[in-house]
Image (spheres, grey):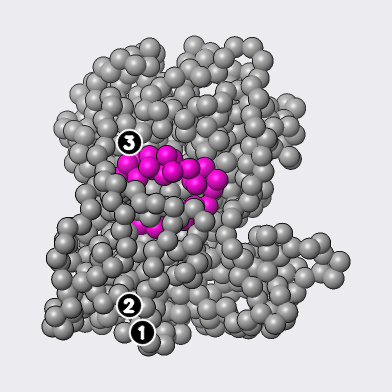
Amino acid sequence: MTAQKFRVRAPQLQGRGWLNTAGRDLSLADLRGRVVLLDFWTFCCINCLHVIDELRPLEEEFGDKLVVVGVHSPKFEHERDPEALKAAIERYDVPHAVLDDPELLTWQQYAARAWPTLAVIDPEGYLVASMSGEGHAEGLRRLITELIEQHTAKGTLSTDGTLPERDEREDTELRFPGKIALLPSGNFLVSDSAHHSIVELAADGETVLRRFGDGTRGSRDGTNPQFSEPQGICVLPADNTLGYDVVIADTVNHKLRALELDTGTVTTLAGTGEVWRGAPGDPVDVPDDPLEAKLSSPWDLAWYEDHIVIAMAGTHQLWSYDPAKNHLAVYAGTTVESLKDGPKDQAWFAQPSGLAADKSKLWIADSESSALRWIENGEVHTAVGKGLFDFGAMDGTAEDALFQHPLGVAVLPDGSIAVCDTYNNAIRRYDPATDEVTTLATNVPEPSGAVVADGTLVVVESAAHRITRPVPPGAAQEITQQRHRTKRPPVELSPGQITVEIVFEPPAGQKLDDRYGPSTRLEISANPSALLITGEGVTTELQRTIVLTKEEDEAEPTEEGDGVLQVIAHAASCDVEGPNPACHLSRQDWGIPIRLVPGAPSELVLMLRGVNA
């Protein structure tokens, strides 16, 4: 469907306050005369982090003619904390101003429905385009270029006035470290993510012995290497004959890198540096040569069944790499973001971010579903976790227990599992023997990785920029018990027949690409499934009629609504000109809270990409 052309004045920016502006508040009036790009994001979301990196070249290319504003619209309770948001802005090197919008005021004004959502405002203050998901960089470049040319000709482009400076940033020996591994020597390797390097620490966890990486963002191999926000570290068996000792998940470079400890030489094992993009559920075609493969934010690594298993956070999968055969493959998951157990090639994950292996099981911190999961004998199981929108801090039976966006796991000497419960600032313990969860330590600032050394749990306190042993001996600790659901205002729809329409308009210079089959795809489902009477499934049209209802004896809806309508859309486009036109894919997965109200609208319009001129 193509967007209708009309001029809409951009709503004002409302929120709790501004960050990364050196203390200055902003309004659209302050930015008049420039192109403004609003990026609705939340710092837990891997797709949002991809968009921040996609926008960096645009911000550099267009200079002060373009102003990017991040509108932070939190999913998790922890993300509502302004100090946590301030830390995230530095952690992910956000280069632009950020509006803190914990009550989703601006989110609602711009009718955002999913993370990430982008909105473009022209120099006269009119909303001219909206789009959801990632992969819009080239279309944005063309649109911004067109707007600059138009408004230069009209005399309405102006770069008068000064733009806010970024907040000053403190530096420490480690800065937002991510993961940790134990070396045979008893020393540690730590991914010093915000310093774009790998650090060897002495057994005390404090003394820096060596640093691999020059501290700048890049992907250079050799003895003076570069990384880009590296995370996972896997130390290979000591008897390997590969010529290297360690494999590193170079997360923002979308690569696997090898490190030879004696010489400090780094080589690239897998990844082109481009991020894989496809429709949720699309199979990933991994080429025979790992260096030709497109990865997507590899976040952690573990040695399991003589392979390196990769937590591929960006595709919501696990991949595997066989270093002896130099073979890369999908190990588990389908690219659908959700929580579903079963055979590993049919299971669903949600941004897996932490891995640890024992003798028979591979343990997984599945961050966006706030879940602890494991794989054994080719089957995926969930120990703790409810799904994408339920989280909290609850001890007790595994069925009742809750985590909040865990990023790390470690196997303890007694066979129980330590969980870095990142957004609860806690270390939790799951005991497979009793199927119960307890709390080992609280007040641990955003723990993101852990390893056992000499029988003691050693933890990366990422937000405190240090490595500690935070678990006291003796009795378990108490954690404040709380349950949460993602707080997004539900969309009110009428019970009965509903028309769902996805707006997609190719960017200037592109057209829908049907060379290899249908160019669009729409998948709809619901939770609970009884909410959706008809209209479930996959079609190639971006418009569909569905029927919604609720059980007659169903309890009154909560403030989150009657359920969630899951809508997944993608559209393939290609350049109009050139002998080998480049291909582009726009995709988005909306999980929309729904409240059924008689007399409410009977149409749901979602913006994949639309332009109003």
Closer to the N terminus: mark 2 or mark 1?
1
Q: Nearer the viewer, residue 436 or 413?
A: 436
Q: Which quadrant would residue 86 be assigned to in this image?
A: top left
Label 2: few (<14), some (14–19) or many (≥20) C-alpha neighbours in 10 Å: some
Q: Which quadrant would residue 398 be assigned to in this image?
A: top right
Percent across and percent down for residue 93 are 29, 45
Q: Nearer the viewer, residue 405 or 15?
A: 15
Q: Residue at x 31, y 54 (%)?
A: 25
What's the mark number on residue 486?
none
Q: Is residue 236 above or below residue 608?
A: above
Residue at the right extreme, as displayed: 553
Q: Is residue 590 left or right of residue 46?
A: right
Distance (Cα) linking label 1 and label 3: 43 Å
Secondary structure at badge 3 equals helix
Q: Which quadrant would residue 324 be assigned to in this image?
A: top left
Q: Is residue 48 left or right of residue 175?
A: right
Distance (Cα) linking label 3 and label 2: 39 Å
> Residue type at mark 1?
Arg
What's the mark number on residue 126?
2
Q: Nearer the viewer, residue 392 or 190?
A: 392
Q: How many marks?
A: 3
Q: Is residue 562 above or below residue 42?
A: below
Residue matched to label 3: 193
Q: Residue at x 51, y 19 (%)?
A: 470
> Residue type at mark 3?
Ser
The magenta segment is 70-93
